Image (spheres, grey):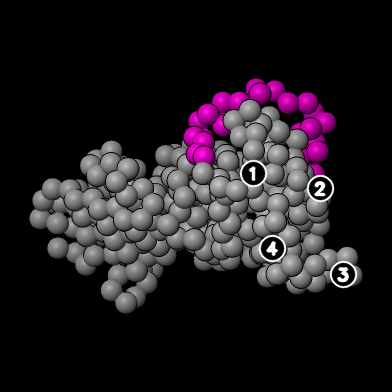
Amino acid sequence: MTTPVRVRVPATSANLGPAFDCAGLALAHHDLLDFSVEPSGLTVEVHGVGEGELPLDESHLVVRAFRAACADLGWTPSGLRVTARNAIPQGRGMGSSAAAVVAGVLGAWALCPEVATIDLDAVLRLTTEMEGHPDNVAACLLGGLTLSWTGEGGVGADSLTVHPDVMPVVLVPDATLSTEVARGLLPELVPHADAAFNAGRSALLVHALTSGAFLLEATEDRLHQRQRTAAMPGSLELIDRLRAAGHAAVVSGAGPSVLVLARRTVRGADQSPGAQELQDVTALVPDGWSVLTPDVDPTGARVSRGMGEVSSR
C-alpha cells in the first residue's frame, strides 16, 4: 500500500465582475481530503458541509475526478478510501465543485506509484475538461489572482500576487443556485459596446487587484450579472446597495453569493480603514446571510504525505 496523502483545496470566486470565465481568486477557506489505497472496495466519508447529503459511492464528484485521473495515468488502485472534511459552501458560487475536481485529480497523481511528481499542466487540462471552463480550477490549483485562457495549445493559466490591502468579504445566502441554471440565462449575443466595456474593465481589474486601487471602477460589468437577476434577485439588490455605498461588490462565480473586495487600510482621506469598511458592509447585509472574511490564499491547492509536501513538477 502507498502512503496516504492529504489534499487541501481553497474556495474560489470567479469572474470578479467583468472578467467572465477568465479570472478567479483563491480564498483561504478550505476543504481537506485524505486519500489512501486500500486492499479492495471504495469507502467515502464526508464530514462538515454536505454530510448526510453527498453520495458515498462512485458518483461522488471527488471519486469521479480521481477515477478520471487514474485513467489518464493508466493506473488502477486495488481499493480506495476518501475522507472529506468540507468547509466550502456548496451551490453558492464559491467553487465547491472545482475544489472537489482538483482534489480528486491531485489525490490520484499523488498516490500513483508510477509518477514521482505532479504535472500541474496535466492536472489543469483534466480539471478544465471536467468543469467546462478553467477559471475556478485554475484559481484553486495555483492560488492568488489567476488568469486563465484556452487556445490551440490547450488551456493555460498564470497566478498574480494580490495587493495586501485587498480584503475579500463573501456574503453567503441560505439559497443555492446551480451553475447550469445561471449560465442558461445568458444571451447568445451581446452588443459590441458592452463587450468593449468589459474588456477595458477586465484589464483595469488586474491593475486594481495587484495595486489595491480602483476596485469599485474595475468591478463594473455589463455581460452577465444583470442578465441573471431572475435567478438571484436578492443578490443583485444587495450588490446595488453595496455599490451605491462605494463598496466593490460583485456576484461570486455563478452566485448567489456576493463578493466584496474591501480595503484593509486607509488609502486617502476619503477612504475608511478595513475594520470600518467591514462594519459598513455587514450593516447592509440582510437577515439570513452569512459573512465570511477569508484572506486571499496565495498558494492554492496543497498536497502532503506524512509531514512533507509532495513536489508539483
**Visible in this render: residue 210?**
no
Near-viewer residue (180 or 255): 255
Tell me the amino acid under the disc marked 3: Gly
Q: Nearer the viewer, residue 234 or 81?
A: 234
Q: Position of residue 184 (x, y in %)?
A: 56, 26
The spot of residue 77 in percent (x, y) is: 18, 51
Q: Main secondary structure of the magenta part?
A: helix
Instruction: List the residue tagged with mark 2.
Output: 244
Q: For mark 4, what is the residue? A: 278
Judged left or right of residue 160, residue 75 is left
x then y, percent, for residue 37: 18, 58
Q: Where, quadrant-wise, is the C terminus in this rendering?
A: bottom left
Mark 2 crowd level (few <14, some 14–19, many ≥20, 10 Å Cα): few
Outermost residue toward the top in this view: 188
**Is disc 1 placed on a helix, strand or loop?**
strand
Pair 1/4: label in front: 4
Disc 3 element? loop
Amino acid found under the numbered disc labelled 2: Ala
- For disc 1, the marked residue is 251
Element type where label 2 sits in the image: helix
Q: Magenta part of the protein: which range?
A: 175-204
Q: CA distance from mark 2 to mark 1?
A: 15 Å
Please tell me whether residue 194 belongs to the stretch shown in magenta. yes
Marks 4 and 3, the one that precedes in the sequence:
3
Please name the residue that numbered disc 3 is placed on.
268
| Left or right for 295, reference 281 | left
Q: Closer to the camera: disc 4 or disc 3?
A: 4
N-terminal of the pair, mark 1 or mark 4, is: 1
